Amino acid sequence: MSPADQPRRIAFLGSPALAVPVLEALVGHGYEVPLVVTRADKRRGRGGELSPSPVKAAAQRLGLAVTDQVDELLEVGADVGVVVAFGRIIKPHVLTQVPLVNLHFSLLPRWRGAAPVERAILAGDHRTGVCLMDVAQELDTGGVYRRAEVEIGPDETLEELRSRLVALGTALLVDALHEGLGPPEPQVGEPTYAAKVDPAELRLDWARSAVELSRVVRLGRAWTTAAGRRLIVWRSRLGDGALEGPPGTLAGTSVATGQGSLELLEVQPEGRGRQAAEAWRRGARVADGEQLGR
């Protein structure tokens, strides 16, 4: 179902924190938001208390009606629904009755799926962007109303890049709603798919190249082991050439890899807080020549 060219009554579907700025912008620009749809509350902590999604918390703060039932969209008379990282399948009977547009954080058809920003970093892409697209029954296949591109910084983290893309996408959406959506254009090119990042992918395999490992670190919570205990690597940079010894060999704050070396900048030992890698080396019982990840 096609949306009105300049909609004013806009439902919102989203759950994580990255969707909150988009919802806030819609309200801030005077759009009527009759309903927010988000995930159900989850039980967290030892007490098992119910915790709302970041989007639900924002909706309640803004005084908006909120639900976890997608079918309630059918009852509010929205001109369009805006979807941002909703994370749930929207069934065909809803798609045929409520026009929906989605902010997707990649240059479609590259990186359709759940983790487009992560996969762009891991693949070493130099550019990415945001697409405002029609929601279709098949995953991220809808036509594109607007798109915007950005360069990916060589050391840019997932959090930093995602923040830039959310700001870019928010502006793209607001401009499109104000100026009129117009007809979407079909996606052109060979699609690639962005599966969720498995926790196992965050373990640093020192046999890989330093370039590949630095990309893993940029996702956040990459880890290895030192003296048998987990060590999270929060920040790193490419070292100056190769080091002696097998992959994983430690020399100061640098680590030998399958190709080149990786310098550790910020780490978090098990049971401790984040700290500079130099401070960790001074206090750790790990000598030069020992291997990480064993």
Image (spheres, rainbow, N blue to C red):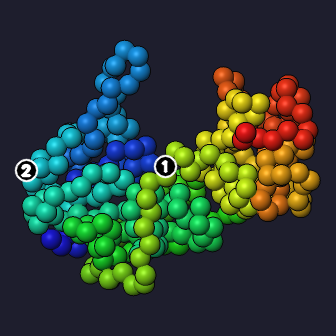
Q: Is residue 234 visible?
A: yes
Residue 254 rendering spot, x and y as whole percentages: 85, 47
Check disc 1 and give the amino acid type.
Asp
Q: Earlier in the sequence, mark 1 or mark 2?
A: 2
- Indicate the quadrant where residue 59 lies: top left
If the image is split into quadrants, where does the N terminus sit? bottom left
Q: How many marks?
A: 2
Tag 2's secondary structure? Answer: helix
Q: Residue at x 25, y 36 (%)?
A: 40
Q: Residue at x 81, y 41 (%)?
A: 291
Residue at numbered disc 1: 198
Of 203 and 184, nearer the camera is 203
Q: CA distance from mark 1 to mark 2?
A: 38 Å
Q: Which mark is drawn over residue 175?
A: none
Q: Residue at x 38, y 38 (%)?
A: 54
Residue at numbered disc 2: 75
Residue 62 rendering spot, x and y as whole percentages: 31, 38
On screen, residue 248 versus residue 271, left or right, reads right
On screen, residue 234 versus residue 103, left or right, reads right
